[in-house]
């Protein structure tokens, strides 16, 4: 079964500290993986997708097929990073996206 | 290009009523998906349409249905509303062969 697990509902770090939001997935194949952000009462916005291998707002995410993980990392957290993050899996051509439960990041001054 | 739009943005209904929500995808996008977002269950997949055909469906009762029109616009309908249907309903669109989805602002439904 397809599943996305984000083990932390809430993650609190100090400004300037490194941050890692964990995401593990279950899928027998080669999925496409995404990180979305959701600002308070606003629409979901794409942050990263694994195939682009780019850095957005200082965030990077590496797909580890052996560990079936797609953790989101940033070396120096900023207060404006305090939003909700969702990891998502989509099977190519599968017409379905599975989301994790989300992690609320709180960056303390 | 204009983003994904959803109407109405807010809706209040009573138990037993039915509701229809509308979604207009980004121009050129032929896939439209629907999701239910609640504090307790998070984001749950409802269904996805491509070329006017439902291609996949989540684990929701038959009261939840949808359709897609030839211009790719989509509607979802919930019949015999229950209190637990109160949620934010999100629509997303993507291009064929491109898995990145773009989300609308959502319709916030409150069932009293």
Image (cartoon, coloured by chain):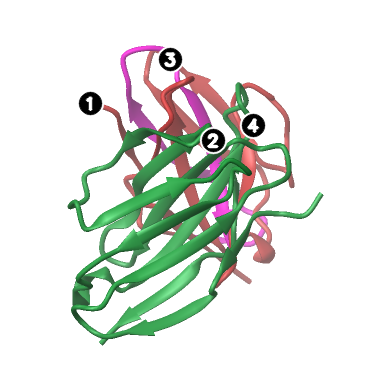
Chain colours: A red, B green
SS assignment at label 4:
loop
Residue depicted at x 41% and y 24%:
A94
In front: label 4 or label 1: 4
Decide: is B5 above or below B61: below
Mark found first going from the N terminus, 1 or 3: 1
Q: x, y percentage for residue B87?
A: 35, 69
Same-chain check, marks 2 and 3: yes
Residue A13, disc: none
Q: x, y percentage for residue B14?
A: 26, 85
Q: Which residues are magenta?
A: A12-38
Residue that badge 2 annotates = A34
Q: How would you rate the neighbour count of disc 2 (Cα within 10 Å): few for under 14, some for 14-19, many for 20 or more?
A: many
Residue B95, disc: 4
Same-chain check, marks 4 and 1: no
For disc 1, the chain is A
Front in this rendered view, residue A103 or B106 = B106
In front: label 2 or label 3: 2
* Residue A38 showing in the rendered view: yes
Decide: is B111 above or below A39: below
* Residue A82 showing in the rendered view: no
Residue depicted at x 19% and y 51%:
B62
Residue that badge 3 annotates = A65
Q: Is B62 situated left or right of A54 in this image?
A: left
How far, Cα to Cα, is label 1 from label 3? Answer: 16 Å
Residue that badge 1 annotates = A1
């Amino acid at each position: 079964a397809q599943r996305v697990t984000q083990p932390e509902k809430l993650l609190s770090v100090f400004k300037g500290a490194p941050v890692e939001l964990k995401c593990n997935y279950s899928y027998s194949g080669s999925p496409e993986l995404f990180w979305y952000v959701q600002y308070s009462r606003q629409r979901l916005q794409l942050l990263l997708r694994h195939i682009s291998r780019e850095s957005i707002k200082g965030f990077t995410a590496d797909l580890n097929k052996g560990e079936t993980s797609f953790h989101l990392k940033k070396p120096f957290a900023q207060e404006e990073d305090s939003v909700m993050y969702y990891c998502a899996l989509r099977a190519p051509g599968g017409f379905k996206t599975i989301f994790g439960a989300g992690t609320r990041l709180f960056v303390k001054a | 290009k204009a983003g994904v739009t959803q109407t109405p943005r807010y809706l209040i209904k009573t138990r037993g009523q039915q509701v229809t929500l509308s979604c207009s995808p980004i121009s050129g996008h032929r896939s439209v998906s629907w999701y239910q977002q609640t504090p307790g269950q998070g984001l749950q997949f409802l269904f996805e349409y491509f070329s006017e055909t439902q291609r996949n469906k989540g684990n929701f009762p038959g009261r939840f249905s949808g359709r897609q029109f030839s211009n790719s616009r989509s509607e979802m309908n919930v019949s015999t509303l229950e209190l637990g249907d109160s949620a934010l309903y999100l629509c997303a669109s993507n291009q064929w062969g491109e898995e990145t989805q773009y989300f609308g602002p959502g319709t916030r439904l409150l069932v009293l």
